[in-house]
Image: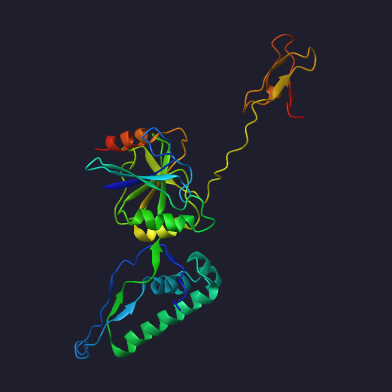
């Protein structure tokens, strides 16, 4: 299962980005193969429509869950129709490693 | 020119059946194409005629405009009438919709998550795997926390002894350590 995490940088030590549409990087983590992929977000400085564009970007990677600090207004209906689960994590200081460890804890 | 983009319609719950079949001795004689009732049309019919909302209220529930709702509703009635008169089957599927999902909160890792697949029940937190989860009703909860001002002081009116104000404890219930008088609130930002 693939999980997308919004990240402020492209290292494992960077923290979770509190915004979904305009985050700096997306981390695509595969819980089965443990592979980690960093994708820079092209919509970082978009004036409008960053959320839906980011949804397309992430959905093209076949993710099942998205972890972010907050999701915008237009996102919920899109993600519900794509059956992607949203996870809101309000703790700003959590790093990508922390979140991946949490996800691995599941099994 | 590409057609105008449809707004995604919100459907609260999927219908309990996938469709309807005509019955009776002659029902098999006229085998025709089944009528495809879209999910949004089913929802419009449910809101209007089952829950007896008016078009304006129902359109707000489905997150579409009132004219759009009326169009969806009239097309639903045309399709149902067609199925009834011509003895066709009704298949409920398709449409540009999403099912409303519920929110949950996990008290172990302090996260919120939703359940996009209604037919599967969520038993554990998708992040940390703990089962300390509960339904989160975001519409009826005030998310903005009251502003806590920790800089306020409790001041004794008699001897001017000051101590930090503790949030949630009224100053008039606090007594001065030195002269045992009731304390008074003094706001730091004033």
Instruction: Give the camera-side residue of B156 and A78.
Output: A78
Decide: is B161 above or below B18: above
Please state the total of marks drawn on the protein image: 0
Instruction: Give the camera-side residue of A43 and A99.
Output: A43
Query: Residue pushed farthest top?
Result: B178
Q: Position of residue A48 (x, y in %)?
A: 53, 58
Residue B66's quadrant in the figure?
A: bottom right
Q: Position of residue A79 (x, y in %)?
A: 39, 56
* Residue in the picture at 29% in, 69% down: B17
| Image quarter of the N terminus of chain B | bottom left
* Residue in the picture at 57% in, 42% down: B144
Residue B174 shown left or right of residue A46 in the figure = right
Residue B42's quadrant in the figure?
A: bottom left
Residue B64 shown left or right of residue A94 in the figure = right
Residue B93's quadrant in the figure?
A: bottom left
Q: Position of residue B91 (x, y in %)?
A: 29, 76
| Coloring applied to the structure | rainbow
Instruction: Give the camera-side residue of B137 and B40.
Output: B40
Q: Position of residue B150 (x, y in %)?
A: 64, 26
Query: Residue pushed farthest right?
Result: B158
| Image quarter of the C terminus of chain B | top right
Residue B162 seen in the figure? yes
Residue B130 seen in the figure? no
Residue B185 shown left or right of residue B110 in the figure = right
């Amino acid at each position: 299962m693939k999980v997308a995490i919004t990240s402020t940088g492209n290292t494992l030590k960077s923290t979770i980005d509190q915004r979904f549409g305009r985050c700096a990087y997306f981390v695509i983590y595969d819980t089965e193969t443990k592979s980690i992929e960093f994708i820079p977000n092209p919509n970082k400085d978009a004036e409008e429509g960053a959320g839906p564009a980011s949804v397309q970007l992430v959905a093209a990677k076949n993710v099942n869950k998205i972890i972010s600090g907050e999701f915008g207004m237009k996102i919920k209906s899109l993600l519900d129709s794509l059956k992607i689960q949203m996870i809101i994590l309000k703790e700003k200081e959590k790093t990508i490693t922390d979140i991946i460890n949490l996800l691995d804890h599941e099994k | 020119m590409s057609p105008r983009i449809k707004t995604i319609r919100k459907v609260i719950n999927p219908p309990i059946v996938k469709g309807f079949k005509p019955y009776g001795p002659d029902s098999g004689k006229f085998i025709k194409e089944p009528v495809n009732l879209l999910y949004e049309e089913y929802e419009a019919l449910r809101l209007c005629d089952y829950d007896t909302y008016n078009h304006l209220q129902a359109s707000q529930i489905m997150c579409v405009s009132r004219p759009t709702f009326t169009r969806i509703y009239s097309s639903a009635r045309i399709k149902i009438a067609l199925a009834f008169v011509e003895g066709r089957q009704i298949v409920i599927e398709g449409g540009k919709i999403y099912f409303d999902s519920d929110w949950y909160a996990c008290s172990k890792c302090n996260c919120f998550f939703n359940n996009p697949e209604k037919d599967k029940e969520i038993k554990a937190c998708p992040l940390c795997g703990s089962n300390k989860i509960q339904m989160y009703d975001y519409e009826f909860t005030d998310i903005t926390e009251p502003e806590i001002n920790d800089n306020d002081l409790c001041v004794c009116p008699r001897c001017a002894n000051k101590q930090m104000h503790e949030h949630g404890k009224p100053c008039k219930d606090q007594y001065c350590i030195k002269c045992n008088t009731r304390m008074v609130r003094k706001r730091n930002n004033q």
